[in-house]
Image (cartoon, rainbow, N blue to C red):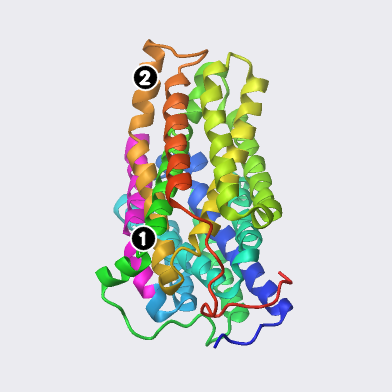
Amino acid sequence: MSEPAAPSNRLKAQVAAATAARLVLNVGHRMVYPFLPAIARGLNISMHTAGLLVSARSAVGLLGPLAGPYSDAVGRRRMMAAGLLALACGAALTAVLAHYPVVLVGFVLLGLAKVVFDPSILAYLGDRVPYRRRGRVVAITELAWGGSILLGAPAMGWIIARWGWRSSFAVLSALALAALGGLVLALPKGEGTGSGSMRPFWPTIRLALGKRAAAAVLGVTCLVMAGNELIFVVYGRWMEDSFGLSTSRLGLATIVIGAAEILGELGVGGLSDRLGKRRSVGIGLALTAAGYLSLLLLRGDLSVALLFVFVLFLCFEFTIVTTIALATEMAPAARGTMMSLNVGAASLGRALAAPVAPLLWTFGEQVKMGGTPLGWNGLAAGVTTLLALVLLLGLVPEPQQTIGAPGSLSHDSV
């Protein structure tokens, strides 16, 4: 028997607290990229050595599947709290003890925070929100991703310009603790509890992947993220080499990506529940693949290039957010594990594509395809995304709302 429907204002408060917490988490994740040179100067290290900090943080994402069984056992609320504590501790270590080995540990904790928090909040929403409304709610929390670029990165830049790079991590630590307090208040003790017992790891993984469609969705996630990484890794170099953008103008150009992500997330909220998640993912994959392949036609016009970037990231964000909503219903009996596997699949896609992207760019400089060296990257990204579309259409049906799913709600006022 499912629990009684919660009051709508209570669920709205939970979604608001989750969105605020994810905003803080994503600011901590994304602020590193534009300000990595400042961090390198502060630590007196090379950019290559500073890049290893980001690599170490990203590598933690591959441990995502290990967190899933804990989420199902100890509860979503505790895992979310653990994620925010890891963020606060990692940022505090970086701010207070600014020495490279300590900062490396801090960055690992920052990566761990996202691995632990994101699957838990998505599993919690999957437990509480009916599948027919889930696209809208997931999209609301995903606004924190685009918002972290539009709002968080400029704010952190202002802080760094006035008080130095370490101050930004001190502020991040304080914000993480504030987000933790808000989440604890919004999710009272007893909400989001787990089974109370830890299942063996491999049987839990097999439970999450009991249906062929669940494994296929993980494949879609991996391929979608790989395709995007093939472009994003060389995005800055493309803008600098092809259009001569300075660092400040490159930052303004990056706002285009944030705006596109926000619009894509709003599109998920407005369309995915009406069209169906599977159909929405299919449409998004087709449009994203077409966008990547269209990069072959680009010439040296900055305004046209930025328009392409805007449309491309809008389609990508619509696709990946709807895929997340689809994944939440692939394994209701082990939802936390499934969402952790989804994080691991996304990390694997990034890890596989990241070293390939510069090689394709270098090859494109020598053997051009289309109007820019980006042509080979666009072709590879387009083919990768089309493979994801084939996988979706061949193996993933539209799931039905699970009757009596843990904590499912009957109300629609979200």
Please state which of residues 389 and 165 is positioned toward the viewer in this rendering.
389
Q: Which mark is residue 362?
A: 2
Give the amino acid type for the residue marked by disc 2 in the picture: Thr
| Residue drawn at the location 62% of the way across and 59% of the way down | 135
Whether residue 58 is in magenta: the answer is yes
| Residue drawn at the location 55% of the way across and 77% of the way down | 403
**Residue 259 seen:** yes
Q: Are marks 2 and 1 in contact (CB under 8 Å)?
A: no
Looking at the rendering, the stretch of residues picked out in magenta corresponds to 45-70
Give the amino acid type for the residue marked by disc 1 in the picture: Gly
Q: Quadrant of residue 68?
A: bottom left
Q: Where's the N terminus, which quadrant?
A: bottom right
Q: Which mark is residue 271?
A: none
Residue 361 on image: x %, y %: 40, 22
Q: Which mark is residue 64?
A: 1
Please state which of residues 20 and 39 is positioned toward the viewer in this rendering.
20
Please state which of residues 372 and 246 is positioned toward the viewer in this rendering.
372
Q: Where's the C terminus, which quadrant?
A: bottom right
| Residue drawn at the location 37% of the way across and 35% of the way down | 47
* Mark 2, other Cα within 10 Å: few <14 / some 14–19 / many ≥20: some
- In the picture, measured across the screen, residue 370 lies left or right of residue 101, that is right
Please state which of residues 83 and 11 is positioned toward the viewer in this rendering.
11
* Mark 1, other Cα within 10 Å: few <14 / some 14–19 / many ≥20: many
Point out the tag, 2 or 1, that comes first from the N-terminus. 1
